[in-house]
Image (tube, grey):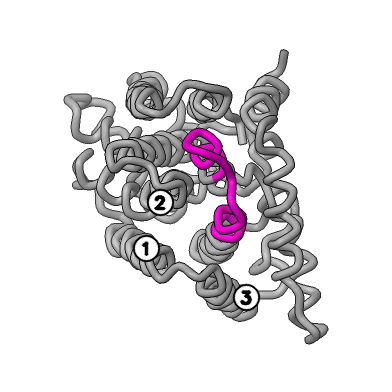
Amino acid sequence: MSTISSTTTTLEQAYRRIRPDLEKVERIIRDELTSDRPEVAELCRHLSRFHGKMLRPALLLLTARATGGVKDIHLGLSAVLEMFHLATLIHDDILDEAGTRRQVDTINSRWGNESAVMLGDWLISHAYHLATRQGSPWASLEISQTSHRVCEGELMQLARRGRLDLSVEDYLRLIELKTATLTGLAARLGAHFNDVAAPVESACLEYGTALGMAFQITDDVLDLVGDEVEVGKTLGSDLAKGKATLPLIQCLNNGHAREAARLRDLLADPACCNTSAVRRLLADAGCIASAEAVARDYVQAAKSAADALPAGEACTALKLVADFVLVRSR
């Protein structure tokens, strides 16, 4: 079985219990992403092709299923998180000068950076409006605080481009802010509105946060070693933009003196993102495998946290989602 088919099967198994709920969330998003302004409507139609794994809504719905059941507020908040996530993708594509996402043109590559910036802003404002309509000031506050932390993480990453002195701890803190806080909130929201005991809600937060850490590490590895056709988006942007991801940091800081010197020489070359030399060096030094091992540790931490939830199909599905992170190719 190919990697793509095996990862698809894993997600299909995990999502089977919540497929009808996900379809409801998709309908909410589709209804929200409309405009009577033709220029905006055209962008929204293209944006609808960006829907991918729906990971954040899935985490929210699965933890809701695991802790009592899915309510209307779960559906609405799932749509809010996905809309916010879509906005971050649009902005990320601008920062990375990416040309494709989900195997289609990015907003910035087709309509330019100005339109992409404004569409991302439009999405965020729309997501906040939908959040307030759910009737929970607590949820609106948590979502706004989380979006604040995501933006802080992105700003930290921008400020640290080109720096080769980042520690592993610096990197992990950065990805916790820009990625794991949102997946952690998604898992927490599913439990919170089922009035579970505090330790169970905390376990959901821990599960989602650890899963987000593993997801981002894997995403960074895919940017180095993935296949653009399989991944479905522009790769190599981390090297091109001077982002120090985990494999690079481990090579530079973990005793690989000869490899580190060679890596510094390669990174000093503006054309390094167009060569496989960096990838080969990191693979030969064991730094790709080492980063993947860190991701596995986070996946195991996520699955251990899920053990605190009531046993059942939803809990099993959460563990399948965790397994998917390690084998995904897109």
Q: Tell me the amino acid under the disc marked 3.
A: Leu
- Start-end of magenta stretch: 61-78
Q: Quadrant of the N terminus?
A: top right
Percent across and percent down for residue 258 are: 23, 26
Task: Name the residue beneath numbered marker 1.
Answer: 142
Work out whether residue 260 can be spotted.
yes
Please tell me whether mark 1 sits on a helix, a strand or a loop.
helix
Name the residue that disc number 2 marks. Answer: 185
Residue at x 75% of width, y 58% of height? 27
Label 1 near label 2: C-beta < 8 Å?
yes
Residue 156 image-quadrant placement = bottom left
Q: CA distance from mark 2 to mark 3?
A: 24 Å
Alpha carbon distance from label 2 to label 1: 8 Å
| 74 is within the stretch colored magenta | yes
Q: Residue at x 56, y 53 (%)?
A: 74
| Mark earlier in primary sequence (2, 1) | 1
Q: Is residue 222 covered in magenta?
A: no
Q: Which residue type does callout 2 highlight?
A: Leu
The front one of 274 and 301 is: 301
From the top left corner, tell me how far across and down residue 48 is, in percent: 75, 60
Locate residue 327: give its quadrant.
top right
Callout 3: few (<14), some (14-19), or many (20+) C-alpha neighbours within 10 Å? many
Please tell me which residue lies in front, 216 or 33. 33
**Which label is found at residue 119?**
3
Where residue 254 sits in the image (x, y, percent)? Answer: 19, 28
In this rendering, which labeled residue sits more in front, label 1 or label 3?
A: 1
| Residue 258, placed above or below residue 199 | above
Q: Secondary structure at mark 3?
A: helix
Q: Nearer the viewer, residue 83 or 309?
A: 309
Q: Is residue 143 left or right of residue 5?
A: left
Could you tell me the amino acid type at mark 1? Glu
Report the quarter where the C terminus lies: top right
